Amino acid sequence: MRGLSISPEGSLLRVQAASARWILAALALTALAWLAALAGLLAIANRVHDDVPALLAVRLPLLQSHPELIFAGESRTVYQVDAGLAAQLIGKPQGAAVNIGYDAGEPLALLAAMHREPERFQKAQIVVSVAPFLFNEGVRSAAVYPQDVAARLGVAEQMVSFLPLRVGTLIRFIREAFNARLAADQHIADLGTQPAASGLKVIDHTQEDDRWPADIGSHAHYANWDLSGPKARFEIGALCDMVALTRKLTVVVPPWAPRYDRASDPSWRDKDDQYASLVAEAGRRCGFEVLNIQSVPGLSQGNYADEMHVNASGVPIYTRFLMSRLKR
């Protein structure tokens, strides 16, 4: 009986199929190895993580003046509140008011600082600004996801929550965990250099017109709107826990630029009202004051550097208004 012959084309196809299987197997093994390595790094990061991030630690030397008014929170504190002016307005010397806010600052981090050095906070009034991304579970970008919330998720939940599209959030968490541990080990909060201008940073430029969002309802901070996740639970819980650690706690919901109109943007209005109501309800339950500032008299579009932050000209206007609203 004559044996079956295999054509050169058939042999080539079989070789290509075998090569494809080997390539797929190699890719699968590479992906598994990468996931295992990432899980290992996350486990280490969770162990070394410190709830006081490096960005906050470098601000804490300002507390050496034993201030009676401490401004904290996210970027709308950092770039909008002149603590030196605030001290003048209450007739106190420089150092009586300080600004320890930092970009994407979260209540959990401030609470950790208060637990670590309670004597620096217990006789002061704390004024904390909050933003919707701190509570909206739908926002998972690396730039603003609260690091202390990420640390409370555990490795499995971290990977399920952020892979594959938000791997950058996990990478930032790993980096910031080691930075926070280094800052703690070097005692930056106690031994570091005090920031200038009582902590105020000024935005000295204005965003180009074509970079302003068309509306706020579709802003990234309100994306995939969800206030039922761990962010809201942990951060609201932190605000409530602060009440017993300070003389008075005030939580501020700052305004957006006046070019945006809540009345003509129902999506923004509804979402903003929900997050403001979340904070207000916690204030009633836990005993802290809430200032929901939707607009500031005299603060015009020209005083804004972008949709959220004032420029140098807006700082004294915002600071004076905020001080006029504080109950002391």
Image (cartoon, grey):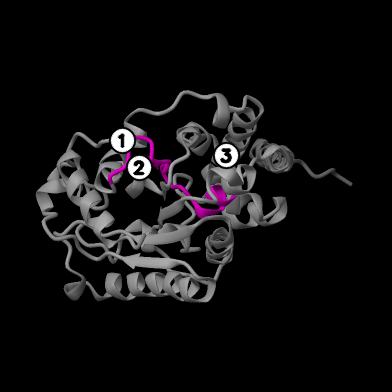
Question: Which residue is label 2 attached to?
Answer: 78
| Disc nearest the viewer among 1 and 3 | 1
Question: Which residue is label 3 attached to?
Answer: 171
Cα separation, mark 1 vs mark 3, equals 27 Å
Going from N to C along the chain, the mark reached first, 3 or 2, is 2
For badge 3, the amino acid type reads Ile
Q: Residue pushed farthest right?
A: 1
174 left or right of 1? left
Dot 2 lies on which element? Answer: helix
Residue depicted at 10% across the width and 48% down the height: 302
Cα separation, mark 3 vs mark 2, equals 25 Å
Dot 3 lies on which element? Answer: helix
Q: Which contiguous range is marked in magenta?
A: 91-111
Going from N to C along the chain, the mark reached first, 1 or 2, is 2
Going from N to C along the chain, the mark reached first, 1 or 3, is 3
Q: Is there any visible trace of residue 170 in the rendered image?
A: no
Q: Magenta segment, principal secondary structure?
A: loop
Dot 1 lies on which element? Answer: loop
Question: Eyeballing the image, is 35 above or below 308?
Answer: above
Mark 1–mark 2 CB contact (< 8 Å): yes
For badge 2, the amino acid type reads Val
235 left or right of 186? left
Residue toward you, 218 or 232? 232
Residue toward you, 299 or 167? 299
- In reply to whether residue 45 is colored magenta, the answer given is no
Relative image position of residue 21 (x, y in whole percent): 71, 43
Residue toward you, 246 or 305? 246
Q: Quadrant of residue 313?
A: top left
Relative image position of residue 194 (x, y in whole percent): 44, 27
Quadrant of the rendering where the C terminus is positioned: bottom left
